[in-house]
Amino acid sequence: MGGLCYHRGTYCYLRSCTMKLLGVCIILAACSTISLGDPDHNETIQCVIGEYLWCDEAVICHVECASNCTCTLDDANTVISNCTDGSVSTSQVLYPAGNVTCLDWNGTLHAVVKPKAFERFGSTLETLLLGNVGLDEIHPGAFSGLSSLLGLALHSNALDEIQPGVFAGLSSLQYLFLYNNALDEIQPGVFAGLSSLQYLSLYNNTLDEIQPGVFAGLSSLQRLFLDNNALDEIHPGLFTGLSTLEILYLSYNKIHEIQPVAFSELKGLHGLSLNNNMIQEIPPEALVHLIQLQKLILANNFIHDIAPNTFKSLRNLTYLNLENNKLSVLYSTTFQNQTSLVDLLLGQNHLVHLPPDIFDSLTNLQTLNISSNNLNQIPILSKCTALSTIIIKRNPLMWITREVFVGLNSTTQLLVTSPTICCYAVSLPCINEDTPSPFLTCTRLLTLDFLRIVTWFAGIFGIFGNLFAIYSRFRDRLQSNKVQFLLITNLSISDLTMCIYLIVLLSVDAYVDFFPANSELWRKSPLCRFAGALSVLSSEVSAFLITLISIDRFLAIKYPFSGRRLGTRTARLAVLMIWLVALCFSTAAFILSGKDSNYYRISEVCIGLPISRLKTYNSTQSRDGYLHPYSLYEVHLDPYPNTSMMLAKYQCTYPLLCLLVSILSAS
């Protein structure tokens, strides 16, 4: 078992130890189970030798203490049960012959450990497992005489206090597990004499304050886990003497302030996790001594500003997570010295602007996440030649140039929201959250010269043709049928509005050379809204009028000699209703497009007709940002916490209309 059990002269890995402590074990030998609390009998506890996945041989003592009793480990050979009814029973513990190196007490003890409880094992015991057995109290001197003990597991119990002297004499102890208890205070001197301790786990307790000097004397400590407690402040001098510490977890606390000299003693620190606290500011002096730091996690805090030289001394930093804070501004020198940085996560902040040269020194950067900010432009990334993943989605990007992504030959994915951004990175694998518009173009609004010529022809001749039709109808109105005059004249007016719509699009196409650069502005502009309203008005009026004309012709053919005809008054009322209904639709489109900036997000030509609908498939990875204490170095850190990728496809509502649109907008 990792670091705890001795195996052929070497120690197993720490991960092995963790799995053992979590109960991942295989017991190959059966052991007897004794239920204590019967006042009439003195029982015998038969301990047996069991083989575990990570420990060749361990002595297993299984005890079930009655729910109304408290069992006391008086010494290594006796377990005394005191019950609420006043009865007392004693059980003799029988161990297998030979030296015991690994001892596992499991079951439900509800126990108090008395002084010298394990003294009989002397210098042979190397691993003692008392996790998850309901320990209430441990008396000072309980582990005296265990001079060879390497690992002690007291996790997942009911301990609310540990008195000084409990660990006295454990000069060889390397691993101490105290997580998942109810500790609210640690007194100075509790860890005195543990000069060989390398691993100390105190996470998931109720610690609200730790006084300076508590960790004094832990000169060999490498990993310290204080996460998921109630700490609100890091006192100066708390980590004095921990010059060998490599990993420090302080996440999921209530820390709101970091003193400038809080980490001044931790010059050998490699990983620091401060995520999910209430930190508002990082003093530049707080990190100046962490010259060996490689991973820094500050996500899910309330940091609103970072001074320009805060990370100046962190030249070995490879991973920096500042996601989900309140950052609104960064400076040109913020990452000036981070030439070793590989992963930079700045998503879910309030950034509105990034200096043009902010990433120029990050030549080894591989992952950049600036998603979910308020950025309207991003700096040129050409000097970050090692970039493999770029996440810029969920930003209101308005001003962007094709030079931003030039030279990024190592990029394997670019994650964006708007499909038009992909037009600036045609050589990169681009993944967009929004469904591409059927009118999406990466050049001009109308991509084909032939299509442009035909549209100009249709628009100009349509205007003149419809004006001539209106003129001729008014000229001959006295000689023509009044109903036909009314219907055809209004149809010409409706077609005329569609020609005006085409001229608006053609003017934009002629004025804008590279359309993606102005796509967002165009779709949100009043001119696009006006053009969209015209298209709705023309299409609705034309559709209704053609229907009305068809009804009139049907009646004329079906009943040629009867009086079944559309009267002038009926036709006028019908035409008036058609225009009123169409005006309501077009006015609603104009108003709604002003309130919803994404109203025309699937239509570069501002068409308000429902020619398509989105069919979305969500593949969501949900992570709470919590890194398990054993994972900072042993598990690859996912650079995409709290992310959701949307893959969308178009499904046509009106196939013939979609086919026509596809032909007209083909590129």
Image (cartoon, rainbow, N blue to C red):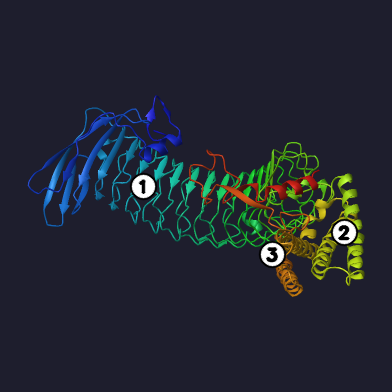
How many angstroms separate mark 2 from mark 3 (CA)? 25 Å
10 Å crowding of disc 1: few (<14), some (14-19), many (20+): many
* Helix, strand or loop status at disc 1: loop
Give the SS element for disc 3.
loop
Residue 585 in the figure: left or right of residue 404: left
Q: Picture coordinates of residue 143 (x, y %)? A: 30, 43
Q: Secondary structure at mark 2?
A: helix
- Residue at mark 1: 155
Q: Residue 154 at x, y = what percent? A: 34, 46
In the image, residue 328 sits, relative to residue 650, either above or below, namely: below
Task: Tell me which corner region of the image, top left, top right, bottom left or bottom right, holds residue 522.
Answer: bottom right
Looking at the rendering, in which quadrant would you find the C terminus?
A: top right
Q: Residue furthest front?
A: 561
Residue drawn at 78 percent across, 51 percent down? 379
Q: Is residue 516 left or right of residue 196?
A: right
The amino acid at mark 2 is: Ile
* Number of on-image labels: 3
Instruction: Choose the circle earlier in sequence order: 2 or 3.
Output: 2
The residue under label 2 is 503
Foreground of the two, 140 or 517: 517
- Specify the label residue 596 is tagged with: 3
Confirm whether residue 404 shows in the render: no
Query: Residue at image x 34%, y 56%?
Result: 161
From the viewer's side, name the closer residue of 174 and 602.
602
Q: Amino acid at mark 3?
A: Asp
1 or 3: mark nearer the eye:
3
> Could one spot residue 229 in this view of the protein?
yes
Q: Residues within 10 Å of mark 2 (few under 14, many from 20)?
A: some
Q: Nearer the viewer, mark 2 or mark 3?
A: 2
